[in-house]
Amino acid sequence: MQRTLLLLSTLFVIGQASAHGLWLEERRGNLETIYGHGAEDKAFKAEKISGAWAYDSHGRMIPVTVKRLDGHARLEPLKSPAVVAVALDNGAWSLTPDKQWINQGRSQVPTSTQSLHTFKYSLAINQEGARLPKLEQLKMVILPEVDPLKVGPGKPLPVRVLVDGKPAAGIKLIGDYRGAPHQVSATTDSEGRAQVLVRNEGLNIIAAEVSLPVANNADIETRGLFTSLSFIGEEHRE
């Protein structure tokens, strides 16, 4: 059995500085990056989008532009992608004694009681039969082990969670991040695998997060990772 990166004993809850997630959603014909939690859709600094990648159905890269708008960012691939991934670097955060989060490291907030650097990742699968490329740029990723567009609502989707490229055990998976963001659907086993029920005919967003200790860093003591996998549950029929 492949040795896993994480043990349950190393996990703990990330603070309010990382309470929001990231996913991709088509709105008015545009591919939008959504920063939110459940039904919330928050404005964010578009320059925090640190990377975007688009691929065709064979896993070949498609050029994609990040259009940075006021309060959000839009992805503009050269042609319709089968697979899209995006990353957001939320920067360092410090918690003050009066329970306020400040978007700075503890070297700038010397009275901080907690400090972390958060990163958000999202993977969207848009076409049946799409071949997934290597996604090493996503430091945490939920990989479907079958084509998620062929599973159908009410059926289990097998997934595997990787953190820093290695299987991650004990990861709690939210099966419907937008509709039920606090409801855990499954927990990964020792090989990083789990079965998550496909909840919706429309957009499904499966999400997870983890907090990892960081040693010998002047600004942070923790690295917080969030990731989501999105896809449509059932083909639209008129």
Image: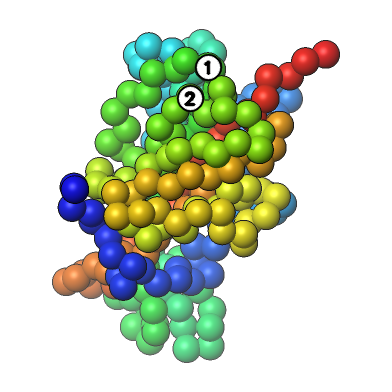
Task: Say whether residue 133 is visible.
Answer: yes
Q: Nearer the viewer, residue 21 or 114?
A: 21
Residue 128, numbered label: 1
**Residue 57 spot, x, y in % from top left:** 43, 13
Other residues around mark 1 within 10 Å, as few (<14) / some (14–19) / many (≥20): some
Residue 117 in view of the camera: no
**33 shown above or below 78:** below
Outermost residue, right side: 238
**Disc marking residue 107:** none
Percent x, y of residue 112 = 39, 82
Label 2: which secondary element: loop
Q: Is residue 218 above or below residue 173?
A: below
Amino acid, disc 2? Asp
Q: Amino acid at mark 1?
A: Glu
Residue placed under numbered mark 2 in the picture: 147
Which residue is painted at 39% across and 84% down in the image?
Answer: 113
Task: Tell me where residue 52 appears, x and y as whole percent.
Answer: 42, 31
The numbered mark, 2 or 1, whose residue comes first in the sequence reads 1
Whether label 2 touches label 1, CB < 8 Å: yes
